[in-house]
Image (tube, rainbow, N blue to C red):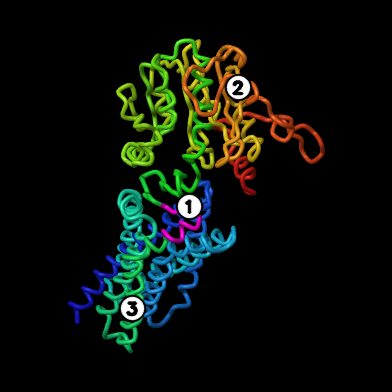
């Protein structure tokens, strides 16, 4: 009898650590799901962590009402955590694919609160049971709390470095759910003499196990079919790198690349985007021998740059090695970028663009800024006055920079805020935009220390769309897309500057794109 109590006591401490690991994994998993599907990572992580902790508080309060059958109560709490948490990612993708906008957010926040509440009930029950069979109240409580807090650290590290990059969010959820279930079944075995109708409880656990194991092996593929509904065309490649989810779709001859659900290019018309991004820049640069590309890991911008024999050196800085690897190995992308990134003139650096410019002492004749839209805090810093000041400081006196700056039609205020922010560094700017069927009307900001005269530019490289006569027309903006923006009272809005201290770009971006 005494030996069994020792085993029970020891496992309670272990169980508190294990369920804490599972709890923290679910907590950050929900944040990752919100960031990927709903956008704005800081906002989603803040909301999910806040809701999870609120749920834990509610659960801890409700645990006072659990006065009998502590072990059985704990077992069924774990059953519910295993089932709800295990299916959370799977069902989230289903809700996004099949239901109207807003349902996915409501589902995620509800699941977060429920799992948080169940997690909050676990620890008080374990502490009370440990007190029943432990040595003293002080010692047993301290041990359970230590296991819980230590488990939280382990859970966070496991999710960041193992589960998310290796298994993905769907399989990770099912696996963690199975761990919760195993804890419940071990507790059921160790405390079997205290529990009536053990066969019924084992049957319930067995049914849950079947569902979770099925999800472990088949959930990812079924969720992929859900996710395909989010895209226009069939998915031919999907991977989740350390930084983002990478998807390639194909319909007939149209190859599309998506990063975290946002379209990056379509093979049908990407030449329009990349020609405007690159060729005016080189045409305005007196001696374009050394070029820096920030972003552009798909290799399309580099492809256009390689059309100029006078360019001797191209440095491409892209944070995610997986994107560059895909550009070099995927036959569809290789055909599109013409194996550009393997050219001997190209040097690829995997680093954050801001950090690269902060630490580099090199100067460049031209700088191409082809970064994702500023839809979260980490990307926002790459659209600030501080960042564009770094770009200016690495630009040779006669050099030119070109920045992709989202759509002046869909995100009008965002576009002109980016333009103002670049101009605030002291550079002269020229505003360009082009119609890209897969994207819509898209904007760019050209910048130089000298005034830019589009009439004098001469594009010498072979192009599919752009020609000299078109350049001036690209600088003409209609009344619903120019920088004369008025509020509801008819007063002209003052377009400010985006800075690290005052990051006003993100709310503008979210409000601009919510209807598209």
Relative image position of residue 439 (x, y in whole percent): 56, 40
Relative image position of residue 124 (x, y in whole percent): 40, 69
Indicate yes or no whether the magenta region holds residue 226. Answer: yes
Which one is nearer the viewer's eye here, 241 or 280?
A: 280
Classify 10 Å Cα crowding around label 2: few (below 14), some (14-19), many (20 and above): many
Residue at the spot of label 2: 471
Assess whether mark 3 and mark 1 are in contact (beta carbons under 8 angstroms): no
Relative image position of residue 459 (x, y in whole percent): 52, 18
Left or right: 494, with 9 as reference point: right
Q: Residue furthest bottom?
A: 197
Mark earlier in primary sequence (3, 2): 3
Indicate yes or no whether the magenta region holds residue 290. Answer: no
Residue at the spot of label 1: 233
Residue at the spot of label 3: 205
Which stretch appears magenta? Answer: 224-235
Cα–Cα gap, marks 3 and 2: 68 Å
Cα–Cα gap, marks 1 and 3: 40 Å
Q: Quadrant of residue 506?
A: top right
Assess whether mark 1 and mark 2 are in contact (beta carbons under 8 angstroms): no
**Residue depicted at x 21% and y 73%:** 7
In the rendered image of this protein, does residue 405 appear above or below residue 38? Answer: above
**Would you say residue 224 is visible in this rendering?**
yes
Mark earlier in primary sequence (1, 3): 3
């Amino acid at each position: 009898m005494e030996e069994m109590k020792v085993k029970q006591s020891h496992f309670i401490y272990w169980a508190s650590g294990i369920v804490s690991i599972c709890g923290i994994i679910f907590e950050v998993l929900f944040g990752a799901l919100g960031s990927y599907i709903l956008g704005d990572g800081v906002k989603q992580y803040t909301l999910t962590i806040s809701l999870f902790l609120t749920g834990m508080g509610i659960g801890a309060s409700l645990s006072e009402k659990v006065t009998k059958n502590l072990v059985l109560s704990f077992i069924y709490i774990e059953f519910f955590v295993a089932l709800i948490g295990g299916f959370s990612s799977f069902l989230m993708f289903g809700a996004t694919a099949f239901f109207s906008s807003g349902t996915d957010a409501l589902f995620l926040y509800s699941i977060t609160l429920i799992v948080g509440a169940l997690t909050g009930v676990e620890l008080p029950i374990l502490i009370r049971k440990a007190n029943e069979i432990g040595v003293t109240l002080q010692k047993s409580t301290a041990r359970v709390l230590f296991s819980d807090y230590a488990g939280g650290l382990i859970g966070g590290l496991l999710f960041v470095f193992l589960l998310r990059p290796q298994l993905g969010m769907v399989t990770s959820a099912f696996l963690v759910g199975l761990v919760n279930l195993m804890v419940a079944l071990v507790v059921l075995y160790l405390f079997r003499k205290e529990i009536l109708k053990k066969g019924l409880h084992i049957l319930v656990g067995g049914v849950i196990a079947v569902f979770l194991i099925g999800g472990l092996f088949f959930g990812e593929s079924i969720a992929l079919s859900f996710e395909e509904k989010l895209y226009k065309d069939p998915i031919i490649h999907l991977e989740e790198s350390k930084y983002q989810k990478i998807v390639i779709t194909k319909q007939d001859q149209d190859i599309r690349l998506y990063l975290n659900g946002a379209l990056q290019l379509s093979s049908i018309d990407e030449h329009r985007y990349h020609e405007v991004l690159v060729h005016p820049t080189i045409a305005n640069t007196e001696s374009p021998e050394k070029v820096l590309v920030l972003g552009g890991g798909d290799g399309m911008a580099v492809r256009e740059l390689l059309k100029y024999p006078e360019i001797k050196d191209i440095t491409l800085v892209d944070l995610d090695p997986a994107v560059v690897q895909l550009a070099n190995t995927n036959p569809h992308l290789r055909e599109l970028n013409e194996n550009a990134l393997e050219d001997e003139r190209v040097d690829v650096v995997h680093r954050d663009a801001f950090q690269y410019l902060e630490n580099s002492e090199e100067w460049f004749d031209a700088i191409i800024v082809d970064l994702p839209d500023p839809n979260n805090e980490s990307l926002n810093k790459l659209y600030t006055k501080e960042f564009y000041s770094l770009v200016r400081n690495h630009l040779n006196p006669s050099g030119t920079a070109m920045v992709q700056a989202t759509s002046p039609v869909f995100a009008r205020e965002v576009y002109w805020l980016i333009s103002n922010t670049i101009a605030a560094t002291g550079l002269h700017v020229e505003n360009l935009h082009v119609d890209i069927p897969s994207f819509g009307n898209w904007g760019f900001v050209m910048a130089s220390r000298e005034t830019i005269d589009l009439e004098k530019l001469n594009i010498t490289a072979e192009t599919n769309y752009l020609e000299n006569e078109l350049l001036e027309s690209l600088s003409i903006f209609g009344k619903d897309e120019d920088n004369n923006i008025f509020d509801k009272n008819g007063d002209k809005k003052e377009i400010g500057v985006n800075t690290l201290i005052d990051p006003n770009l993100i709310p503008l971006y979210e409000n601009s794109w919510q209807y598209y």
